Every structure is written in structure tokens, then in C-alpha cells.
Amino acid sequence: MIPRYSRPEMAAIWDSENKYKIWLEIESHACDAQAELGVIPHDAARAVRQAGAFDIARIDEIERETKHDVIAFLTNLAENVGPEARFVHQGMTSSDVLDTCFAVQLAQAADILLADIDALLAALKRRALEHKDTLCVGRSHGIHAEPTTFGVKLAGFYAEFARNRDRLTVARADIATCAISGAVGTFANVDPYVEQYVAEKMGLSVEPVSTQVIPRDRHAAFFATLAVIASSLERLAVEIRHLQRTELREAEEYFAPGQKGSSAMPHKRNPILTENLTGLARIVRAAVIPALENVALWHERDISHSSVERMIGPDATVTLDFALARAAGVIDKLLVYPENMRRSLDQLGGLVFSQRVLLALTQKGMSREDAYLAVQRNAMRVWEKGEDFKSALAADRDVSAHLDSADLDELFDMAYHTKHVATIFKRVFGEA
């Protein structure tokens, strides 16, 4: 990923230094296990542990000749370890190193992403509680529907990202597996104990059956989970972008002193951060199809997945890390305008109470069909002529035959629509 959308901690997971550090750790632990089994001398395992080192520039130089990255690494390792290096990589294949390393990197990335989600959840909870009773209009199809509160909106996003955290926790556990099973995964030349030993040391689980590679359904599920999280981020971003539209201005991104919105129009305050989140979500989701296509490898292995994962691993995790951090910042500093929310709520002259009038008429004896027609014809007068909905209803003979002015006043009570907000918050946030 380009530096503009990268954060150092996540980007460092994917640099060569961390990759080769993990490779060296895998090989060192494998040597220790082989020494315990008596396959290699303890002195050899000790030499790898003590003298094992690598030089990235030298590895690159060797790879230009060998055209094989793991062999290049092992050759450079031998240059540092000495004669004992002949015992390194006993019975192992390149995929044992590559796949186990990739599992470690994805687990490391998941840990950062989980912390990112926690930060976003904290921001959403704080702002939801702040605006628990801030009235606003709920919309369906982009059209005014019924009253809600801005806090309820944010509580919904909190619940969604809490689910995403659970999904990522499961995906992390699923991806964190170790394969040290040798060619075609049969353990013919490496004892299963080596795999168990390395897995424990690396904080991984043992892969039950590795066909020389870790099955790629695990990776597909992992990247699909990242895509779901990205889509949730886009849903949050789109909501803010809509609320920031000039004709609404119910909420907007923080606009810093000295910030400029347009090179041509000095008045502009554009939702650039949430638009950026929408774009970043597309990049994360773009990893899903290649990850799914990687599942069907030829027989016990091929490397058609390799080039894909070298790109989508860093790109998807670095991008999502940046996006989650950006979203937390947006929510933390979001400017909210309750007075504009109330203005929008009142914009259609009370039409948001139409369902309650409909239900009241049925309770008073009208058929649902007749009640719907009576309410709708008065609602259309509001839409088309800008009349006041309650006044129109009061003047309608069919309606007034069942509902008097006191009834209508009660039906147009905003508090009716927020009476269960506390219940929703209890469900989302618990007793506290």
C-alpha cells in the first residue's frame, strides 16, 4: 500500500525484516524439536539459535540467481551459521515456512485490527450515549419515515461493529495454524512432533491436514471477514455523507482551522474523510474474490495462490487498519446539529405520525383499508400543497368521526416514538 493510507505498526508486519525474522524463528524452533528427537545434534540446533542471522540485501542477491526465495534465505542463513546449517530445514518444504509465516503475519494483523475496532466501539458508545435522546427523523428509501434518535442510529453501528469484532476473533483463530508436514503433507521426513513444537512456540494451532499447504478456505474466510468489516465502515461513512448534505446538515465531519474544502470554491466543507472510507472499503472487498479463487489449488499444492497473497495480505490489512482508525477519528470529532435534525423532523408538517393515526383509526372501528385511504389522501395534500397534516386530518369528516382534537394531539406526541430507547440501549450496552 502507498504510505498515504498506511500506518507504521501494520505496515511493519509486511516488511522483509519481519518476514525473515519469522522464517528464522520457524527454522530455529524446528531445529530445537529435531534435536529433542535426536534427528540432529543439539550443537547444531544451538548454533542456529545463537548464530542464526540474515541480511536482506544478501538474500535478494542470492534470489536473483536461484529464483527461489526460501532457498535464498537458507543459503544466507548457512553463511552465518556455518557447517551446522546442513541440519536446518530437515524434512521440511518451502510451504512449511511460507504458510506458517503467513499465518503468523495474519494473526499479528488481526490483533491490530481488533484493537482498531475497540477504539471505534469506544467512540461510537460515547457519542451514542451523548445523543441517546437527540431526536431526528428516520428514513427509509431516503424518504422521511418515523422519528428516532441519533443515539439509536449510533447504537446500531456499535452493535454491528461488536458483531464484526466477534467475527474477526473467530477468523483470527481459524487462520492461526501451523504446517510443518513436509512434501505433500505426509510427515514422511519430519516427525509430527516438530509441527506441534513449532506451533506451540509460535502461538499457533496445528493444521490437522495440510496437503503441503494450509488449506485456503481458512484464508478465504479471513479475507471475507475483513470485507464485511469494510462494508460496515462504508455503511457508517455513507450515513454521515448523507447527513452532511447541505440541505440536511444534521451532522458533519470536523473541519479544522485552516482546512480547505475546494481549490475553486472557498465556501466548501466536503465530507472527504467518509468519502475516502467508501473508497478504501472497495479496496478491502477487492481481496475477497481472489482469496476465494485460491481455495481450489491443484492436487496437494501449486503456487497460483502465492502471488495473490503477497498482494492481498498487506493491501487488505493495511487498508482496513487505516480505515478503522480514520472512522474512529471521524466519530470522535463528528459535529452534530440537533436543531437541524429537529428542523428536518418537522419539515413535512407531521407526516411522520401517519402510521400512528392509521393504527388509531383501526382501533376506533374503521377497516384498515378505509383508514389507510383516509390517512393517505390527507398525507398527499401535505406532500402536494404543503398543508399541515394534523389540521388536514381534523378537517376530514371520516377521520374526525373517530378522532377528536385531543386524540390527534396525543397521536402527534413525539415521546411516543422514543419510549423504548432505553430498552434498545440496554440491549446494546448492557445495564451500564
Image (cartoon, rainbow, N blue to C red):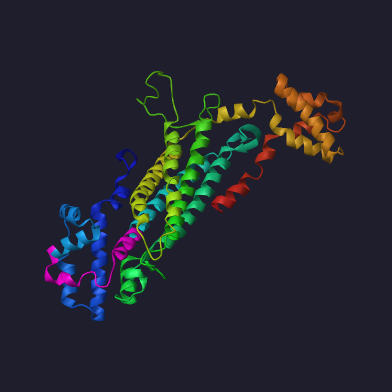
Q: Based on the picture, tell me whether residue 405 belongs to the magenta stretch.
A: no
Q: How many marks?
A: 0
| Rendered-image quadrant of the N terminus | top left
Compare residues 404 and 7 and report the one nearer the observer.
7
Q: Relative to 303, is 125 on the left or the right?
A: right
Query: In the rendered image, which quarter is residue 372 located in?
Result: top right
User: Could you say which quadrant of the image residue 142 lies in?
Assistant: top right
Residue located 56% across and 38% down the image: 150
Q: Residue 402 location in percent, x, y?
A: 86, 33
Q: Look at the image and give the residue range highlighted in magenta.
A: 79-103
- Looking at the image, which residue is at 23% across and 54% down? 17
**Residue 226 vertical placement versus 329 (above, below):** below
- Tell me if residue 81 is in the magenta stretch: yes
Q: Nearer the viewer, residue 175 or 182?
A: 182
Residue 274 is at least partly visible in this image? yes
Report the front residue among 311 and 32. Answer: 311
Q: Residue at x 23, y 77 (%)?
A: 35
Compared across the picture, whether 430 is left or right of 365 comes to left
Q: Is residue 336 visible?
A: no
Image: 383 above or below 168: above
Q: Provide residue 360's location: percent of width, then percent of height.
A: 80, 38
Q: Residue furthest front?
A: 298
Q: Is residue 251 above or below residue 82?
A: above
Percent across and percent down for residue 317 are 38, 49
Q: Position of residue 279 (x, y in %)?
A: 43, 37
State left or right for residue 80 relative to residue 356. left
Q: Is residue 241 above or below residue 84?
A: above
The secondary structure that dominates the magenta segment is helix
